[in-house]
Image (cartoon, helix red, strand yellow):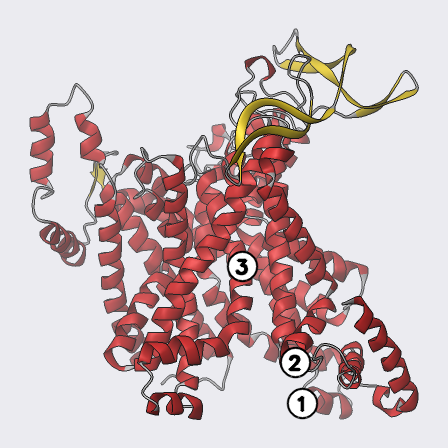
Amino acid sequence: MQQPRVVCHALEALFRARYPLTTASPPPGRRKKRASSMSTLASSTKRGTDRSSPLYLAWRRFTRSKPGVISAVVLLILYLIALFAGFLSPNNLVTQHSEAVYQPPQRVHFMREGKWVGPFVYQLEKKRDPVTFIVKYQENPTRPTAIGFFLRQGERYSFLGFKTNLHLFGVAQTEGYFFPLGTDQFGRCLFSRILVGSQVSLTVGIIGVLISFSIGILLGGISGYFGGWIDNLIQRITEVLLSIPRIPILMALSTVIPARWPSTWIYLGIIAVLAFIGWAGLARVVRGQVLALRDMDYVTAARSLGAPDLRIILWHIVPNLTSYLIVSATLALPGYIIGESALSFLGLGIKEPMASWGLLLKDAQNFQALNLYPWLLTPGILIFVSVLAYNFLGDALRDAADVRSD
Amino acid sequence: MWTFLLKRILVAIPTLLLISLLVFAVIQLQPGGFLQNMLDDPRVSPETVARIRAQYGLDQPVWEQYLGWLKNIVLHGDFGFSFLNNRSVSSLIWERLGWTVFLAVLSIVATWAIAIPLGIYTAINRHGLAANLANLIGYLGIATPDFLVALLLIALVLSTGGSNVGGLFSPQYIDAPWSWARLGDMLGHLWIPLIVIGLEGIASLMRQMRANLLDVLGQDYVRTARSKGLAERVVLWKHAVRNAINPMISLAGLSLPNLISSTIIASIVLNLPTIGPFLYQSLLDKDQYVVMALLMLSAFMLMVGNLLADLALAWADPRIRYE
């Protein structure tokens, strides 16, 4: 991808030099866009990949958006972290350390007595405040513990079907603990729980969107294509789903999931609940688009060739909405992440021993805990970052999909 | 206008009926139930539970239960009985409805009072420091879930030594009669829920207002107004802002579901006397009539809000006629 872009810029400069008029004061704010559209025009004559293909042009428009590209990278990193969560986390998800309850994050040191000794942490020791009896942790300068890398210890976790107990970093179990982000009320490592929790928090959105989009596209397509009483019925149903505020109905639906189910089933149940609410808005928009497309010549042609209705909807009409669908999927995803975290936060979503960012924040719900153990809020940062990244990515994709924005 | 109103209300009735069906179905699908839980209590005999069941018609077929529930609402305004509180649902809801509507309306007013000027300001001064700051806060507001905003504000207040978190009043004022001191105490508590409920709305309204105004400022009639020598102040406020604000009114209707959801979440986290914690507790205890009534109520509030937004839009925009 690098080579053609260099050529592009060179050509752009050439083009501008030769045709100074084309850069003469376009309306403010659009100047940059106009100029680079020229560059794509000029470069399309060059050899190599087809640089006038709509996909390539959309890619060009996308890479021009700095927030969009950064967000894509951030999301990629987050998903990689989720994939390698077991390997990256120093401790086990559920192991409780009863002697390290509510331990604050341990600082990583590199210098000891003025000398570089590599990364190490001090073990913390408990002290009780003589007046308030609140437990305080203090670094014990006599117990430095080196941080090791590629340790094989602790319980096994499964990675892509393999069972292993290899951890990227950590402290040898015989020597002490390392809790980079502190511990919760049971002395469980918050950092490890956040990493493993990302597997739930980040996949809920994607699976949920896939399900609700399948329903939305199918029902919206049928509704717009056939019209008549089917249309009426489906529109009534979407209207009902859209006229109940999200949180109350989500809360009610999540109580339908039996509490004694295993936590993986509950996870799937929460996704189903989120998808059940999510498809309605999309079905409505797809219907509108299908209504506009169904009398186009190519649809009539397909029909006169004897193609079945469902085939026409899914293979002829829906592909025309692809870019629109991708953009709305990206913009819908934050809603799922927030929805899951809100439900789990209220104790109506993901259940222990699974973890999700919302569930981790539940521990911070108590005012006193919040005041004394502020590190319990760190999962919130990840919710914030992922939601923001999806928003920026969606905006950038929308601009990229918009042919007129060139 | 009256025919328009009548039409809207007539259209709303089948939707409300379908909503009631959905709500009822969800409650029926819940495993267990309040009476089921009562059976686990050794002090309650199975006969007592059976008698209560018979009293409220819960031993009848499902569709008869539904029709009975619906009939009582329509004919008597009776939403059923709260097993948990041992009182009628209607009286319980009335107690909390006042604060719920108060908080929601106050949040709308506060949201608009902050978002519209900010939107105008950021549209005019597009690259200033203050505008960038406002945009940043806008992004923060969109990407932070309500309950997280609440937690952060609580942490902030507690860490600065304050204690005015949770509830709407300090303990000594909860049952006190209204006085200036009580009002002041309420205001000291009120800003946290208002920010929690309103932040998302402020962020999206501000961005929308900014986009609308930028759109309008590029229109021909604004250029005409400028070229005939009107003061910039008049051009901005009478020609541009006046037209940019109209689409915001329909947006207000669309943002209502979020507002109601935020109010519920904020109330649960901050322990406010609205329907939020009530719904939460009833869901946990499977107090079925309360849950059904509250879900119906939130849908109803949404519909009323949308209707009001439509009326306001027709009032503000002379191009819209009641048809």
Foreground label between 1 and 3: 1
From the viewer's perspective, is B106 left or right of A237? right
Compute the Cα span from label 1 to label 2. Answer: 39 Å
Q: Nearer the viewer, mark 1 or mark 2?
A: 2
Residue A145 — which label? none
Looking at the image, is B78 positioned above or below residue A172? below
> Residue visible at 41% across and 32% down?
B175
Dot 3 falls on a residue whose secondary structure is helix
Residue B153 drawn at (x, y percent)? 61, 40
State the image quarter where residue B13 is shown. Answer: bottom left
Picture coordinates of residue A294, whole percent (x, y): 39, 86
Give amino acid for label 3.
Val
Question: Does dot 2 land on a helix, a strand or a loop?
Answer: loop
Residue at label 2?
Answer: A53
Amino acid type, callout 1: Tyr
Residue located beneath label 3 in the image: B109
- Residue at the spot of label 1: B221
Image position, residue A185 (x, y; %): 54, 22
Q: Are marks 1 and 3 in contact (CB under 8 Å)?
A: no
Specify the amino acid type for callout 2. Ser
